[in-house]
Image (cartoon, rainbow, N blue to C red):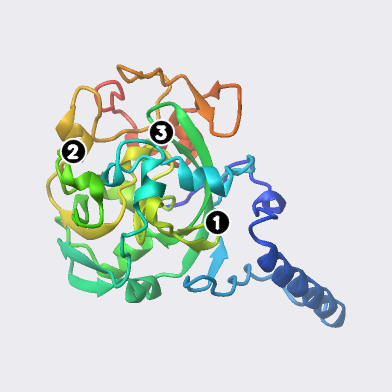
Amino acid sequence: MLIKKPADVASSELTSEALYLRRREFLAAGVAVATLGSRLARAVEPTAPAPAPAVDGLPPFAKSPLSTTSEKQTSLEDATHYNNYYEFGTSKSDPAENAGAFKPRPWTVKLEGELAKPRTIDLDELMKLVPLEERIYRMRCVEAWSMVIPWVGLPLGALLKKLAPTSKAKFVEFTSIVRPEQMPGQTAPILPWPYVEGLRIDEAMNPLTLLAVGLYGKVLPNQNGAPLRLVVPWKYGFKGIKAIVSIKLTDKQPKNTWNILSPEEYGFYANVNPKHDHPRWSQAKERRIGEFFKRETLMFNGYADQVASLYSGMDLDKNF
C-alpha cells in the first residue's frame, strides 16, 4: 500500500535532545564521516539512515520516514507515569506504582490461526523477523487527553507477510497475559480477563500499525505494556493492547474487551472521530498532557490521508 508522509514532519525535530544524547553524538560522528566521504567521492548517493546502536536490550533500530509529527514530544516522565492499564489498577499512577514486580522476560508469543506458518516464538526471535523502527506518533485517549510518543517497534504488516496469512484471514485477534500474582488489578473483576482486542486485516496491514517493544529509545517499561504492545495511531488508546501473548488470524470479527463491557460506549473500530462523542467525553477537543489549553481533535487523529480509505462508504456513527 502506498502511504503518504504528512506535511508537518520535520526530520530535524524528531529526536528528543535530552533523551538521545548518546545517539546524537553517534549521529554527529556519522555526519562528519559522511561529509568527508562526499568530498572524496561526489558520486555517492544518500543512503537510508543507519540503525541506531543497540541500547538497553533493544536490537538496533532506524528512524522511520513514517514518523508523523513534529509536535513537541510528551515528557518521558508523563508518558511513563500517566497511564491507563487496569491490570495494575484504575488510577493513572497505579501502573507505574504497581508494575515493578511484573516479569517481561522470558516471553513467548503464539502466532496462530489462519497462517501458513503458525508457531510459538520467543520475543527475541520475533524481533529478528522484521527490522525495528522508531516512529513518532500522536496518541489520543477516548478520555480526551493526548500525548506524542516516540515508539520503537515492528511494523505489524511486515510481520504478517512473513507469516503468510491464508485466504481466510480477515481479522487479527490479540490477547494479553493473565498473571494476577504480578498484576494486582487482575485480582479484582474490573474487566473480564484476559484483555482482548482486534483489528480488521487491512487495518493490521496498514504501514502505520506497529507492535511496540520500546519508547524513547529504551525498552518498553512495564507500565507501558512491556514487553510487546499494539500501537494504532489513528485509533483511541484503548485499542493498544499491552503485554501481548497471542496474535491470531481469524475469519470472524474478534471481540474487544471494552466493547464486551459497554458496547454502547465502545465500538470495535474506535477510530478517533471528533464528530462522534463518547457518552461521557466530548471528542471535539483534547488536552495534550503537559499543556494548559485544549486543542481541536483531528479526524483519525490527524492520519486521515493514510487511513481514511480503509473506511470508505462506512457510516462512522454506526461503526464507531
| Quadrant including the C terminus | top left
Please provide percent x and percent y for residue 210: 40, 54
Mark 3: which amino acid? Cys
Q: Is residue 17 above or below residue 141?
A: below
82 is higher (above) or lower (below) than 166: above
CA separation, marks 1 and 3? Answer: 19 Å
Task: Tell me which label, 2 or 3, sits earlier in the chain.
Answer: 3
- In the displayed structure, would residue 182 be above or below residue 97? below
Q: Residues within 10 Å of mark 1 (few under 14, many from 20)?
A: many
- Mark 2 in CB contact with mark 3 (< 8 angstroms): no
Q: Whole-Å distance between the Cαs marked 1 and 2?
A: 30 Å
Q: Residues within 10 Å of mark 2 (few under 14, many from 20)?
A: some
The residue at which mark 3 appears reads as: 141
Residue 53 in percent (x, y) is at 58, 74
Viewer-side residue, 279 vs 129: 279
Q: Which residue is drawn at 41% across and 59% down?
A: 155
Q: Which of 170 and 68 is in front in this view?
A: 68
Read off the residue under disc 1. 216
- Mark 2 and mark 3: Cα distance apart in space: 18 Å
